[in-house]
Image (cartoon, rainbow, N blue to C red):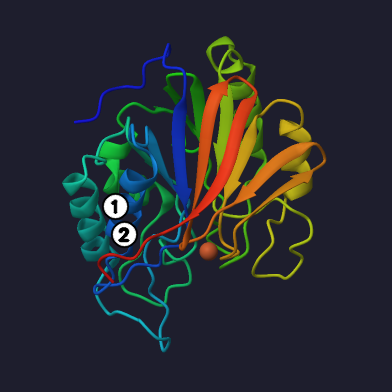
C-alpha cells in the first residue's frame, strides 16, 4: 500500500483524469495508471477521478447492459493492481453517468450509494452529514470532494445551497487554510458552458463562495482538457485521454502540465 504523503516532501504530484466512461471491455483505467507510473519517476502521490467513471448510455456505441456495480468492481480491481485502491492514493467524485438518475435502468445508484461503493477510497475523508462535500488532508493538500450531480436535472450540474455553505465552512478550517485547497467536482463552473446539458446551474454562487480561498478547481464533463480562470478562480478541465498533472511545491506554488494517456492495453 502507498504511504501517506510526507508533508516535508518537496514535491507532491496529483494526477487527474475524468470521464473515462468505462464499459466491460475497456482497459482505459489501467492505461491511465500505467501512464502515471511512466510520467512521474518518483510515483504519482494521489490520483483523482473526476466522475463519469462508467458509461451506460443506451443505444450508443459501447453501451453495456452490465450493472454499474460490475463496472465499479472492475475499476476497483485495476486500482488494486497498481496499489491505488486506498483513500490516501485515490479520490473519486460521481458524474451523471455513474448514477442512474433518469430511471432508465433498474439499478439505481444514489450519490451516497456511489460513495459506499468506493468506501475504501473515502476512509481518510472527513464527511459532512450528507456525505458530500468531504475533505481529505493529504500532506500539503486539502482535497475537497463535491457532488455536482442532480437527481432531477439529468446531465445538468447543481451543487445546492447546503453544499456551498459546507464548502465555505470547510475552507474556513485552520487545517485547510494552512494547506493547498483543491476542489473536485464533475461539472465545470465556467460560465461559457451555457448549453443545458453541460452547465452547472449554480456556478455563480459557487464561484462567489470560493473566490480567493482555493488554489484550484478540478472538473470534467466537457470531455476536453484545458486551464482557465474565471472570477479569479483557477479551473482545470480534465478528460479521459489527457492526464492533468499538478506538481505542488507549496501552498500556492502549483505547476500544471497535460500528458497524453499512453495506450498499452486498449
Ligand atoms: Fe458527465
Picture layout, residue 252 above or below residue 75: above
| Mark carried by residue 31 | 2
Contact, CB < 8 Å: mark 2 with mark 1?
A: yes
In the drawing, does residue 99 fall left or right of residue 245?
left
Residue 217 falls in which quadrant of the image? top right
Instruction: Please tell me which residue is depicted at 35% across the width and 75% down the height of the picture.
Output: 105
Residue in the picture at 28% in, 49% down = 117
**Mark 2: secondary structure:** helix
Left or right, 173 with respect to 52, comes to right
Across and down, in percent, residue 211 comes to: 76, 32
Say which mark, if any, is on residue 34.
1
Q: Quadrant of the N terminus?
A: top left
Residue 133 visible in image: no
- Tell me residue 30's x, y (percent): 27, 57
Which residue occupies 46% across, 55% down?
Answer: 51
Q: Residue at x 48, y 72 (%)?
A: 102
Mark 2 Cα-neighbour bin, 10 Å: few <14, some 14–19, many ≥20: some
Amino acid at each position: 500500500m502507498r504511504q501517506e504523503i510526507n508533508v516535508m516532501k518537496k514535491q507532491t504530484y496529483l494526477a487527474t483524469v475524468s470521464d473515462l466512461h468505462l464499459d466491460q471491455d475497456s482497459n482505459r483505467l489501467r492505461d491511465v495508471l500505467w501512464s502515471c507510473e511512466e510520467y512521474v519517476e518518483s510515483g504519482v502521490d494521489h490520483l483523482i477521478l473526476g466522475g463519469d467513471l462508467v458509461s451506460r448510455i443506451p443505444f450508443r456505441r459501447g453501451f453495456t447492459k452490465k450493472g454499474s456495480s460490475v463496472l465499479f468492481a472492475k475499476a476497483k480491481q485495476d486500482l488494486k493492481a497498481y496499489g491505488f485502491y486506498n483513500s490516501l492514493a485515490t479520490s473519486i467524485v460521481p458524474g451523471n453517468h455513474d448514477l442512474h438518475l433518469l430511471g432508465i435502468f433498474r439499478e439505481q445508484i444514489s450519490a451516497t450509494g456511489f460513495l459506499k461503493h468506493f468506501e475504501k477510497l473515502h476512509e481518510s475523508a472527513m464527511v459532512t452529514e450528507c456525505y458530500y462535500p468531504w475533505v481529505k488532508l493529504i500532506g500539503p493538500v486539502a482535497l475537497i470532494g463535491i457532488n455536482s450531480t442532480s437527481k432531477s436535472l439529468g446531465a445538468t450540474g447543481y451543487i445546492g445551497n447546503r453544499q456551498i455553505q459546507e464548502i465555505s465552512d470547510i475552507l474556513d478550517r485552520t487545517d485547510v487554510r494552512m494547506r493547498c485547497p483543491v476542489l473536485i467536482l464533475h461539472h465545470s463552473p465556467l460560465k461559457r458552458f451555457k448549453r443545458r446539458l453541460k452547465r452547472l446551474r449554480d456556478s455563480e454562487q459557487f464561484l462567489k463562495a470560493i473566490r480567493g480561498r482555493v488554489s484550484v478547481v478540478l472538473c470534467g464533463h466537457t470531455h476536453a482538457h484545458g486551464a482557465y480562470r474565471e472570477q479569479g478562480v483557477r479551473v482545470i478541465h480534465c478528460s479521459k485521454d489527457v492526464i492533468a498533472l499538478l506538481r505542488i511545491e507549496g501552498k500556492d506554488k502549483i505547476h500544471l502540465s497535460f500528458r497524453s494517456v499512453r495506450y498499452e492495453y486498449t
